[in-house]
Image: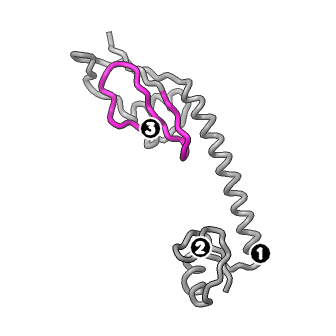
Amino acid sequence: MKVVLLETIDGLGEVGSEVRVRDGFARNFLIPEGKAMEASDPNLKAFRDKIKARIKKETRTKNEALMLAEKLGELNISFTVKTGKDGKLFGSITNADIHEALMERGFEVDKKKIMLAEPIRHIGSHDVTIRLYPNVGAKLKVEVREEE
């Protein structure tokens, strides 16, 4: 039986490839598990349409992420905090604080995508990376000032 693979299967093929398998393997495993569909003309057309729609959606999402990255790159966020000796903060600034500051400015970014190796604990200017899409990131300037 000829089937079109809906996911990559080791030893069989890549997504979208048309392969010939035994009838029982196709009917009992591949098709019920959603790993393949029968390679009939209507199924092939539906699969191609689905792939085109997915590519179009991913392109649109990536373009939106690029535009957002450009806007975030121009943005500066500042925090005024209490400090102790040597400009060390009494608390810290975390990705949740940065997320909240972005939300106040109208940017909706998932706080899990704000990449901080560790919370900010010193006064000064800090670069924070925000991952918006695979291979698309934004550098955000975070300024931490001492409360007077």
The mark nearer the N terminus, 2 or 3, is 2
Q: Secondary structure at mark 3?
A: strand
Which residue shows up at 61% across the image and 68% down it? 15
Q: Position of residue 85 (x, y in %)?
A: 21, 16
Image quarter where the C terminus lies is: top left
Q: Secondary structure at mark 2?
A: loop
Name the residue that disc number 3 marks: 114
The mark nearer the N terminus, 3 or 1, is 1
Task: Give me the disc on residue 13.
Answer: 2
Residue 133 against residue 128 in the figure, above or below: below
Dominant SS of magenta comes to strand
- State how far apart marks 3 and 1 are (Cα): 44 Å
Q: Position of residue 69 (x, y in %)?
A: 57, 34
Q: Position of residue 133 (x, y in %)?
A: 55, 45
Name the residue that disc number 1 marks: 42
Q: Nearer the viewer, mark 2 or mark 3?
A: 2
Amino acid at dot 1? Pro
- State how far apart marks 2 and 3 are (Cα): 36 Å
Residue 70 against residue 112 in the figure, above or below: above
Q: Nearer the viewer, residue 82 or 12?
A: 12
Which residue shows up at 68% across the image and 55% down it? 55
- State how far apart marks 2 and 1 are (Cα): 21 Å
Q: Is residue 80 magenta?
A: no
Q: Position of residue 98 (x, y in %)?
A: 43, 31
| Residue range corresponding to the magenta coloring | 114-140
Amino acid at dot 2? Gly
